[in-house]
Image (tube, grey):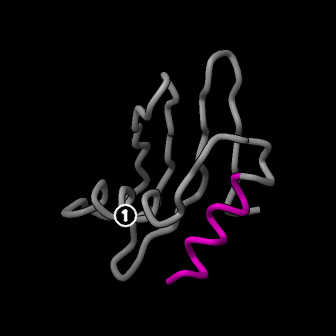
Amino acid sequence: MDEIYNIIEAKIKEGGYTGEVSGFDIYNEVCDFIDDKENGTYIFMSKKDNDVVFEYKVDINDADFNLSYIDIKENDQTFHIDFDA
């Protein structure tokens, strides 16, 4: 699982976001969001410290889920991290 957490963190840094992030926390937050949801595509939002908002697009299937992207909104900037690219 550490590999997944590291990939999340690396992709966010590659996307230009310089704030502190935890792949572990993001993965677990997404898992909490999707718990008991039906198959489909969902947008989830999470407000972090200092008025930073994370927007997750998640596709849920029978056996798994796909984190398609994260948009991180901080002040007037948006950092788009595309996990499908």
Who's the residue at 23% across and 63% down the image? 35
- As drawn, 75 above or below 67: above
Residue 3 within the segment the image draws in magenta: yes
Chief secondary structure of the magenta portion: helix
Who's the residue at 46% across and 66% down the image? 24
Is 72 placed left or right of 54 in the picture?
right
Looking at the picture, tell me which residue is in the foreground, 17 or 43: 17
Number of residues whose C-alpha sits closer than 10 Å to that of mark 1, classed few (under 14), some (14–19) or many (20 or more): few
- As drawn, 1 above or below 68: below
Query: Secondary structure beneath disc 1?
Result: helix
Q: Report x, y in % for residue 62.
A: 33, 78
Q: In which quadrant of the rendered image does the C terminus lie?
A: bottom right
Is 68 placed left or right of 63 in the picture?
right
Range covered by the magenta-colored residues = 1-12
Q: Give the labeled residue for mark 1.
A: 28
Is 48 placed left or right of 15 in the picture?
left
Type of amino acid under label 1: Asn
Looking at the picture, tell me which residue is in the foreground, 82 or 16: 16
Who's the residue at 42% across and 59% down the image? 25
Residue 2 within the segment the image draws in magenta: yes
Who's the residue at 68% across and 16% down the image? 76
Q: Report x, y in % for residue 26.
A: 46, 57
**Outermost residue, top side:** 76
